[in-house]
Image (cartoon, rainbow, N blue to C red):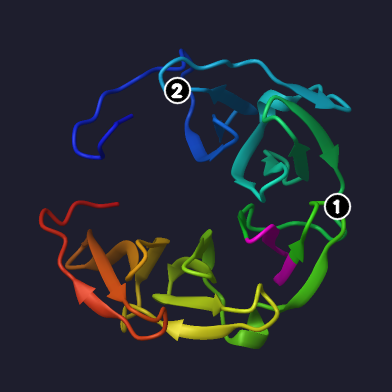
Amino acid sequence: YSDNGINWSSSTSGLTTVFTDIAYANGKFVAVGNHGTIISSADGVTWDTGFTLTPPISNIADWSITSIAFNGTSFAATATDYAGSENFFISNDGVNWDVNVLPVPHSGGVIGSGSGLFITTMSGGIYTSSDGLTWANKGSLSSFGYSDVIEHIDYAGGKFFIVGRSSGHALVSDDLGANWTNVNITNRLESTLNEVVFNGYNYLAIGDIYADGTNRAKSYASVDGVNWTYQDVPDGNYL
């Protein structure tokens, strides 16, 4: 954790698990991970490991909670167990969660949010929801020429970005997921895009490129989210 983004300190939850995603809303950090882990913290230093599921899942330790987002009202998280079953959790406080059934099987385990909406990919489709309960199908990934393994769904600078692993492309929407454009960010294959952010002036995409037998960190900048320029990462470490 850091107060300035330059000097960092470590904290521990006391758990030995792999964490997969984190969200911040209403003065609280909520992190999720393997072995059915959901933890929360008001300061990023001291973590509460307790939470409830309704109805309860008896083998929750066999589940990986893969992604979490907040739409302005509720947290939502996606989860997959070792047998391939899938669930979707909704919470107003990040501690007490309702288990919901999605309208179609969920594959990919990634959810994002922005402008009051949740957005996720289910069974090769793109779906949006204002409450995490009722979902609208906005088209298939394949219809936009997109087949990457999805890593993240971001809302940045008024646009949704779906990014993933393989092609270096992203799907971009500037109308709340109604329409999507396939954008080539890296201009090369064997590229992973992990996330897109916006600082008020420029978009920044970060990821990795596989070259010469190793993964190297790369970043890309854009003023419009469509046309991208390579930016050097000083140490080139894997992201």
Along the viewing direction, whichever of 32 and 124 lies nearer the viewer: 32
What's the magenta region? 115-127
Mark 1 nearby-residue class (10 Å; few <14, some 14–19, many ≥20): few
| Label 1 or label 2, whichever comes before in sequence order | 2
Q: Position of residue 45 (x, y in %)?
A: 40, 19
Q: Position of residue 5 (x, y in %)?
A: 25, 40
Residue topped by disc 2: 43
Mark 2 falls on what kind of element? loop
Amino acid tagged 1 = Leu
Mark 1 falls on what kind of element? loop
Q: Is residue 223 visible?
A: yes
Q: How many marks?
A: 2
Along the viewing direction, whichever of 93 and 195 lies nearer the viewer: 93
Q: Where 83 sits versus 173, above or below? A: above
Q: Which mark is residue 133?
A: 1
Residue 136 falls in image quadrant = bottom right
Along the viewing direction, whichever of 74 and 220 lies nearer the viewer: 74
Residue 220 is left or right of residue 42, and the answer is left
Q: Residue at position x 40%, y 17% from top?
A: 12
Residue 1 falls in image quadrant = top left
Q: Is residue 123 visible?
A: no
